[in-house]
Image (spheres, rainbow, N blue to C red):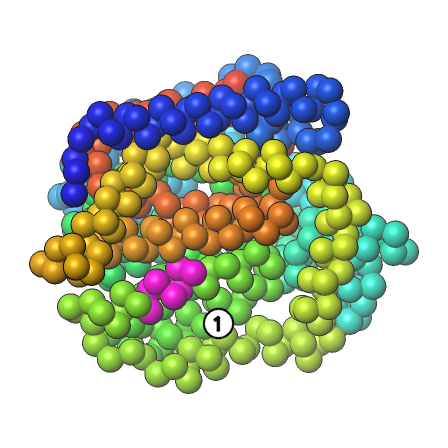
Amino acid sequence: MTRSPRRDLYAVLAAALLVTAAVLVGRHIQGTRRTLFVNWPPLLADWEPHLGPGTPAALTVAAAVVAYGPALAARLTWRALLAAAWAASLAWILSLALVDGWHRGIAEQLTTRHEYLRSVGRFDDIPAALRDFTAHILLDAPGNWPAHVAGHPPGATLTFVLLDRIGLRGGGWAGMWCITLGATACLAVLVAVRALAGEEPARRAAPFLVLAPAAVWTGTSADAYFAAVAAWAVALLALAVTGGGAGWAAGSGLLFGLACYLSYGLTLMAFPGAAVLLLGRRGVRARPLAPAGLFLAGLAVVPAAFTLAGFDWWEAYRLLVTRYHQGAGGVRPYGYWVWANLACAVLVTGPATVAGLRRAGAALWQGRPGRDPAARGRGETRLALLVAAAALALLAADLSGMSKAETERIWLPFAVWLLPAAAFLGHPRAWLAAQAVLALLLNHLLRTGW
C-alpha cells in the first residue's frame, strides 16, 4: 500500500475544497432562496466566536491526547486501554459541551420545541401512547408530535420517558445519559476492530476515536446514544463470529433490534453487520459462527414487543416520509445536500479520517483478488473492509434524500466507524493535532444547533 504523505495531503486538500464549496454555495442559496433552513451551511449553526467554562479543559484534554495518546495506546494493557479511552472520550465530549455552559451546552439540548423531553408527559399511559403513535406523525394531524419525536420510532422518546419514571428527570439527566453512553461508542469500535483486524490496528486507532471532531455533536444530541447502541450491536456481532460465544450473538441481535426502534436510518447498520459476517467467516482466527438462531431470537425481541404494544414500524416509516416532505425536508434542495452532506461528514470525522480513507482504499486495492494473494486477510485489508462498509451505509443514507442537512448529528452512528481509518497513518501526533484543532475551532467559532 502506498504510504505517500503527499497523497494524504492531496486528499485533505480536496476535502477542504469540498467544505469551502459547501459553505460558499450554501451561503449563496440561503441568502437568495432561503431554502436550506440553516444559517451557516452546511452545518446547522451560527457564526458566533466565543469562549466558555469548558475551554481550558478542552485544551488540556486535546494537548494530553496528542502528546501521550499514541504511546499509551501502544503500552497499556488492553483492559486499561479501554478504560482510558472511555475516560478520555468522556472528558473530551464533556469539555466541548461545557464551552457553551451547563444549561445551553447540555441541560437544554433535549428540551427545545423539537426534542424529546417536551413529549414525555404524553406517555403517562405508555401502551396507549404506542398504539396511538402513528396517528400524530403527520404535520396536519391533530396533536402532531414535535419534529424529532415524529422522525424516530417511539423507542427514542420512550427512553427518556423511562428515565423520567425512575426519577432522572429533566434535560441535565437526559443529556448526561446521551453523553455517557455516547462515549462508549469508541470502545465498541475498538472491540470490533481488535476482533476482526487485530490488536495493533485497534491500538493505533484508539487516540483518533477519542479525539474526534464528532465529539462536538456527541455531547449535544440523542444521536450519540443511538450511535452507541448501534456500535455495540456491531461489536458484539464481531465477538460472536470470532468465537466469543453464542451469548454475544443474542446480545447483538437484541441491540440491532433496539437500534431500529431508536432511528429508522439505523437499518443501514446492516452494511457494517454484513462486513462483520464476511470478515468473521474468512478471518484466520475465526471459529464457527455463533448460532444464527440466537441472533435472530435476540433481533426479534424489541420489534415483537413494540408490535404487540400496537406500534406498526412500517406504517410509521411510511407516514414519516410524508411528514418529512411536509416540512423543511420537502423544501431543502437535494441537488445541494447530496454533496454538501459529505462536507458535513468531513467536518465530523476530520482530516485524519480523510487521509486514512485514502489509505484504506489503497489497502483494498492491494488486497483485491488477483492482485496480491499474500496480502488478502491481512489486518489492514480487513480494517479497510470494515471502514468501507460504514462508508457505504453513509452513502446510502445520503442518496436516500432523507438526510438533507443536520447530518453532523444524524450520521454519528456511521461516522464512528470511519474514524479507525486513521490507524493507517504515520506521524499520529501531527494528525491528532489537526483533529483537535478542527474540533476546537468548530466549537468556539460556531454556536452549533446541537
Residue at disc 1, secondary structure? helix
The structure residue drawn at horizontal position 66% and vertical position 73%, both measured from the top left corner, is: 306
The majority secondary structure of the magenta stretch comes to helix
Q: Is residue 71 above or below residue 307?
A: above
**Residue 74 percent across, percent down from the top left:** 15, 43
Front one among 121 and 169:
121
**Residue 439 percent across, percent down from the top left:** 43, 27
Which residue extends farthest right? 142
Count neighbours of disc 1 (C-alpha within 10 A) and say few if under 14, some if 14 to 19, many if 20 or more: many
Range of magenta residues = 271-277
Check if residue 207 falls in the magenta segment. no
The structure residue drawn at horizontal position 29% and vertical position 72%, both measured from the top left corner, is: 241
Front one among 235 and 375:
375
Front one among 83 and 168:
83
Q: Quadrant of residue 3?
A: top left
Front one among 141 and 101:
141
Q: Is residue 240 visible?
A: yes
Q: Is residue 252 above or below residue 354?
A: below
The structure residue drawn at horizontal position 72% and vertical position 62%, both measured from the top left corner, is: 318
The total number of labels drawn is: 1
Q: Is residue 88 visible?
A: no
Q: Quadrant of residue 303?
A: bottom right
The structure residue drawn at horizontal position 34% and vertical position 37%, both measured from the top left corner, is: 353
Which residue extends farthest front? 370
Which residue extends farthest left? 374
| Residue named by callout 1 | 254
Q: Identify the amino acid type marked 1.
A: Leu
